Image (cartoon, rainbow, N blue to C red):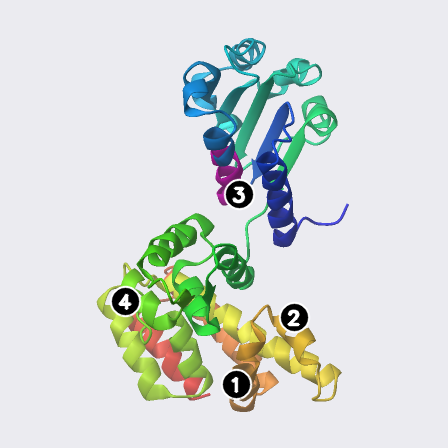
Amino acid sequence: MAKLRAKDTQAAAVRILSDLKKKIYKPVYLLMGDEPYFIDLVSDYMANHILTPEERGFNQLVLYGKDTNAGQIIETARRYPMMSNQQVVIVREAQQLKNFEELEVYVKNPLASTILVLCLKGKTADKRKGLYKAVEKHGEVLETVQFYDNEVAEWVKNYLKEKGSSIDAVAAAVLVDHLGADLSRIANELDKLFTLLPENNKHITAEHIERNIGISREYNVFELNNAISKRDTVKALRIVDHFAKDPNDNPLVMILSTMFGHFSKILKYHLISRKYQGSAPPNELASALGVHPFFLKDYEAATRHYPAGKTVQVISLIREFDMRSKGWGNGAATHGELLRELVIRIVNY
């Protein structure tokens, strides 16, 4: 079986939501996996749209795995709705159910008028067991995987497109570099920002991000990597000094992880270019690096400052400083001092 990818998660969620909007319902839904955003997206839609507000009082119940058991869920699911065609039973944090597999007896013969929604966050059901197979047969499974950082920018673009908005490549990169792959947090920030944009302008820029979300266009990890790539020591150290003043908001572990990913992409650019003898197709390069084609020129410029051998040395150096940040052979250096030393050593390689 092919490995599930982020795009598969998103496609499945879109398909399920499309069916729900058409009032095509299954008796059982199993929403599971490592990306809570899509689990919440689907379950919240069901909680807010299947029944009318009047119907929900009698026919919608939200249970929590730690506070219930399989027997109570089955008993609830087997009840008939009152003055409605359906009842909705949502089990949140179902991964905390101690006897989860016992739900199989109900799922094998579910009540047509009940829509049972099982939400497992950070866990997947055992696909070898009867419960999972019964849901596959009678209901719907949504398995989610966490997005890698290089997949989030595309998700941001699609998220805003659905809302009739757009975002420039630099603004998306700054947003992702600061918030990482936390889709729920990103969606929340974009929703707030979206309401602040003027009616005649729904295009988000880095200036909007800075003004309304509080992420500086100048002092962020994206700009730090860009300055290092250009061997712009003055700008790089100015950003480092800014980070050092607020280490809680700029954790070194996150910065090092982003730097490692950045130089890994520079190395990958070298390898792909070598394969095509310097004329690699731009679309293939962008896809392999997981970046917007807009940024290819920056990586091409970085390869001139950091040949393949030097790039490997930089990656090794970042790993060394990651170990030092965790106490290995570090002495009394602060995280700010470690980052400054690392940047100086990289740009002077």
* Res 302 label: 1
Question: Mark 1 belongs to which amino acid?
Answer: Ala
Residue drawn at 66 percent across, 49 percent down: 8
Q: Position of residue 92 (x, y in %)?
A: 48, 28
The numbered disc on residue 230 is none
Q: Residues within 10 Å of mark 1 (few under 14, many from 20)?
A: many
Residue range of the region highlighted in magenta in the rendering: 35-44
Depth check, front residue: 48 or 239? 48
Q: Quick check: 210 left or right of 25?
A: left
Residue at label 4?
Answer: 211
Q: State if disc 1 and disc 3 touch (CB < 8 Å).
A: no
**Distance between the Cα atoms at labels 4 and 2?**
33 Å
Mark 2 crowdedness (10 Å alpha carbons): few <14, some 14-19, many ≥20: few
- On residue 38, the disc is 3
Q: Secondary structure at mark 2?
A: helix
User: Left of 249 or right of it: where is 120?
Assistant: right
Q: Residue at (74%, 26%) from the top-left corner? A: 137
**Amino acid type of disc 2?**
Ala
Question: Which secondary structure type mostly characterizes the magenta part of the structure?
Answer: helix
Mark 4 or 2, which is nearer the eye? 4
Mark before the other along the chain sequence, 4 or 3: 3
Residue kind at label 4, given as amino acid type: Arg
Q: Mark 2 highlights which residue?
A: 288
Camera-side mark, 3 or 1: 3
Distance from label 2 to label 1 (Cα)? 16 Å
